[in-house]
Amino acid sequence: MPAPIIKIDSISKSFGSFKVLDGLSMDVMPGEKLALIGPSGSGKTTILRILMTLERIDDGHIQIDGEQLYHVERDGRLLPADERHLTRMRQKIGMVFQLFNLFPHKCVLDNVTLAPMLTKGMPRAAAEKRAMELLDMVGMADKAKAMPAQLSGGQKQRVAIARALALSPKIMLFDEVTSALDPELVEEVLNVMRRLADETDMTMLLVTHEMGFAHDFADRILFFDRGRIVEEGKPDEIFRRPKQERTQAFLKKIIAAGHRV
Amino acid sequence: MNRFMINWSGYIGLILDGALVTIQLTLMGSALALVMAFLAGLGRLSRFFAVRALATAYIEFFRGTSIFVQLFWAYFVLPFFGISLTPLQAGILALGLNVGAYGAEVVRGAIKSVGREQYEACTALNLGRWQCMRHIILPQALLVMLPTFGNNAIELLKATAVVSLISLTDMTFQAQVVRAQTGNTLVPFTTILVLYFAMACVISWGVRGLERRMARGLDGVRV
């Protein structure tokens, strides 16, 4: 059995007096597609943000690909990592945000080529060639010269996915990537993600309220509540036969709110 | 009747010579102000306390004392410390440092106005701090700064008049010379009124044009 690509070991995180994560541990296997579900404030987005180094942990350890994320080992002791270490570790991880976070002053193509050129020293021609392949994959090649403001939400999100893929991360984090979209635009983004799941062996972590999509997409579902994993299992186990009361209550509420499972 | 026999062309020429000095002061003062604004504005956002303290001290000091006093310091007091400046150098220095202090707050505010999500996108794309600032934050912040920079440049233009007090032959100085020699106030001071206004208009238009250029594409309407 291969080693986990992400190993989270009893991490805690507080915002002020609010403890978002409380001694959380979990492993993710290479290539695994994982969906994190649960009520808002349950800490699922915080996990993605911590993995992307957008938030720091108060306690615990995280290993990515066999290496400590927030620590460096020196003389057998774990010391807090410096920016250089974080920069190296971030190469393994990409993230797509709920609100796209495209760069509004750069055209679609430049949004995608910027990071490979700056962080990997890729020549412009090579970066553009790769960017066009990725834009083609997400169905946005014809909009390469458009500015983000000219795009619909679904188009923006597809560009954002291409932008994250351009750095060829081993792990992709999707943080409620369809939550800000009009209902009719959700499907085009989900289709791109389905393709990604089918055609690559990337490890994908997904925070979502699209239960139907989580069911089809994920190998494993984690149900979060109050900073802890309440229940985990295969999609059918979680959605059809949830064992925990809180999972049942949450799913009932979600279905009542009109989300399909 | 004698008063109407004045040959104005020579005197107007004098004022136009002064106008060149005023333009020179405005351009070079603005250039220095711009550099100081970015240095101090970025300095105030620095991770390092010493840099923040230095930037804050500069900004508060130059905003809190009058340009008039600063100019006299630059020209009359600095020589006691072994630094002798020409009137033009002293004028550029005082104007640039004074307006730069105001500009620094504009730079800081504009950078702060760029949303946190842009920084987060930079982190997720593994851009370094400076790469993020240079390629993502500053280009967006610049657009926010521009209108206020235009204001500051016009303020600086008008403030150039104080350099006449250290015998620099700018437009206001020359108008006073003409007034002393002809006894006429109306003509020289109306001339420089119009000239100051014209210069301010050029700055306004220039800045607005720049703004339009830079905003292109950002709102999804213009391409």
Image (cartoon, rainbow, N blue to C red):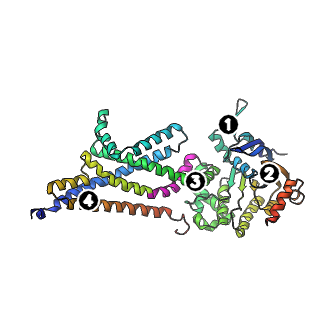
Q: Secondary structure at mark 3?
A: loop
Name which of mark 2 and mark 3 comes first in the sequence: 3
Question: What residue sits right under mark 2 in the picture?
Answer: A225
SS under mark 4 = helix
Report which residue position mark 3 lands on: A123
* Region of the chain picked out in magenta, as a range: B126-147
Q: Disc 3 or 1, which lies upstream in sequence?
A: 1
Circle 1 or circle 4, nearest the eye: 4
Separation (CA) of disc 1 from disc 4: 64 Å
| Magenta span dominant secondary structure | helix
Can you give x and y, in whole percent of width and height, for residue A42 in the image? Answer: 76, 51
Subunit of label 4: B
Q: Amino acid at mark 1?
A: Pro
Inter-mark Cα distance, 2 to 4 = 73 Å
Q: Are marks 2 and 4 on the same chain?
A: no
Tell me the SS state at disc 2.
strand
